[in-house]
Image (cartoon, grey):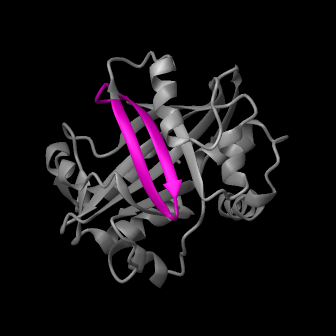
Amino acid sequence: MQMSPVTNMLDGLDPISLEEMDNVKLLNRVDTKYIIPVRSLHRLFDLLKNNYYILEIEGRRSFSYETTYFDTPDFRFYKDHHNNVSCRIKVRNRSYIESNLHFFEIKMKENFRTNKYREKLNSKNFELSEKYLEKIRSFYARDPLKSLTSTLMNTYTRITLVNKMKTERCTIDINLVFQDPENPVNTVPVSNIAIIELKQSDFTASDGIASSLRDRHVYPSSISKYALGLIRIHPELKHNFFKPLLLKLDKIQQQ
């Protein structure tokens, strides 16, 4: 789906600036994810327009992201997720294209909570030096990490919402494309789906986005863009744990 129909859906929401949104960073939070068809977004925005702001920067309300993920050569971080290890991490560097901002990030999932470390980078060109490896080891003490390599790249378009009480953030990702860093011609688009990620200090489904989705019989899904991308790029990887998710995505895309 082209971006313009989605852009037209966003006009009914009041804007919030990046500076105003900084008060709702929620780096330590509960993340809840949902998957819906892109064509259903207009109904969701209609329900939310009186209670949510939309991030707007220089007149733009949707933004391009580029991410490179790092893992061990044997995909240990992916396997931790596949094996449902309770304490697991993702390592990535992320670029916000329109803002020309770049960050190194470690995202740790532990006991259903997400804690994110991020460090601003000077440029998009990033090398995983010993300094960053030491920081990663401080989050991943279970095994010594000698080296990491780039294992996946992805791009997508993100829309960010903030409730008007400024206690909840929501990101909506569309136009996903995955790429193998070792073989750039191996590129896999995942179209027609929107990944909604709700970020709260403590999860509640009594109001807001979670309530609106529940009323439409849309329930949380365990989805990781990293895991999904690796499976699409490397279908030979063991992915039994993710089969229900893949079936759900295939069903949405075929609708």
The picture quadrant where one finds residue 202 is: bottom left
Instruction: Give x and y (percent) for residue 230.
Output: 70, 40
Instruction: Give x and y (percent) for residue 77.
Output: 65, 42
Q: Is residue 148 above or below residue 76?
A: above
Instruction: Give x and y (percent) for residue 166.
Output: 20, 63
The picture quadrant where one finds residue 233 is: top right
Q: Identify the residue shown where x is 40% and y is 46%.
A: 116
Mainly helix, strand or loop, the magenta region? Answer: strand
Q: Is residue 5 visible?
A: no
Q: Identify the residue shown where x is 27% and y is 51%.
A: 25
Q: Nearer the viewer, residue 237 or 87?
A: 87
With 195 as the anchor, is 29 left or right in this view? left
With 43 as the anchor, is 60 left or right in this view? left
With 8 as the anchor, is 175 left or right in this view? right
Image quarter (top left, top right, bottom left or bottom right) of the C terminus:
bottom right
Instruction: Give x and y (percent) for residue 78.
Output: 68, 44
Q: Nearer the viewer, residue 235 or 241?
A: 241
Q: Identify the residue shown where x is 43% and y is 36%.
A: 105
Q: Is residue 62 above or below residue 126?
A: below
Q: Is residue 148 visible?
A: yes
Q: Residue furthest right?
A: 236
**How many marks overall?**
0
Q: Is residue 40 above or below residue 71?
A: below
With 184 as the anchor, is 67 left or right in this view? left
Task: Give the extent of the magenta segment.
Answer: 97-119
Residue 112 drawn in magenta: yes
Q: Nearer the viewer, residue 150 or 18?
A: 150
Q: Identify the residue shown where x is 18% and y is 69%.
A: 165
Residue 92 drawn in magenta: no
